[in-house]
Amino acid sequence: MSMTATVGRAHADPHHIGVVIEHRGPAPKRIVTAYGFWVFLLSDIVMFSCFFAAYAVLVSQTADGPKGSEIFEQRNVAIETVCLLLSSFTCGMASIAADVRNRFWFYLGMAVTCVLGLIFLAIEFREFADLVSRGYGPSRSAFLSAFFSLVGCHGLHVSAGVLWLLTMMAQVFAKGFRADVLRRMMCFALFWHALDIIWVGVFSVVYLLGSGV
């Protein structure tokens, strides 16, 4: 390699140790977008950590009201969990289909994910409505306040995820698999999988441990 070629690279070897570092410019937009969205997800996880901590502190503060073991319906919770975990798989399949530009499997995966998410929300809404109708609303005790806050916050995130999912389907229909659409799809998939991970925590801490209290 000539001296001119060596200097032409980003930085020559200033210490003469035989290693030349070549700078290729800024990172691709996909990497920058993913990094920024991971920062958002981490901040969201910090928020959920606060809800989990509050629930752990207040779980025994029932004010002579019902305990978790008296109000939780494990069958419905199991159905919710299966739906959300299956939706994570179908969301992954939709992401793969988007990467290979296959519209049929993309729409199928997203449609199934949407249906599973709506089933999850319907069961959760019915659970909340039933508790309120029995006089076990969030104002009944500190335990129920923490329960409604934690589980309800997750439900709001799932609702936002379903709306985002429908938006992504509309964007692919209108714009195709453009680079910016694929970046948004990547962020959506990260968001949906994060909700599944958080639900595993909710299922374990609130419903499984709560059933034995």
Image (cartoon, helix red, strand yellow):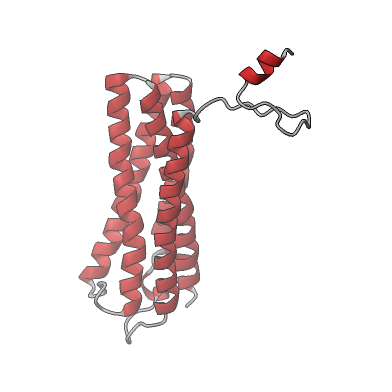
Q: In this view, does 199 lie to the left or right of 130?
A: right
Q: Which residue is drawn at 46% across and 35% down?
A: 32
Q: Residue at x 27, y 21 (%)?
A: 174
Q: Is residue 18 left or right of residue 5?
A: right
Vertical comparison of 162 with 201: above or below? above
Q: Where is residue 114 in the image (x, y as percent from the top left)?
A: 34, 38
Q: Is residue 123 visible?
A: no
Q: Where is residue 9 in the image (x, y as percent from the top left)?
A: 62, 21
Vertical comparison of 158 with 209: above or below? above
- Which of these two is toward me, 140 or 191? 191
Q: Where is residue 58 in the image (x, y as percent from the top left)?
A: 39, 78
Vertical comparison of 166 with 70: above or below? above
Quadrant of res 108: top left
Vertical comparison of 204 with 39: above or below? below
Q: Residue at x 58, y 27 (%)?
A: 23
Q: Can residue 121 be seen in this view?
A: yes
- Which of these two is toward me, 29 or 71? 29
Q: Is residue 163 left or right of residue 187?
A: left
Give the position of the N terminus as an image quadrant: top right
- Which of these two is toward me, 97 or 33? 33
- Which of these two is toward me, 171 or 129? 171
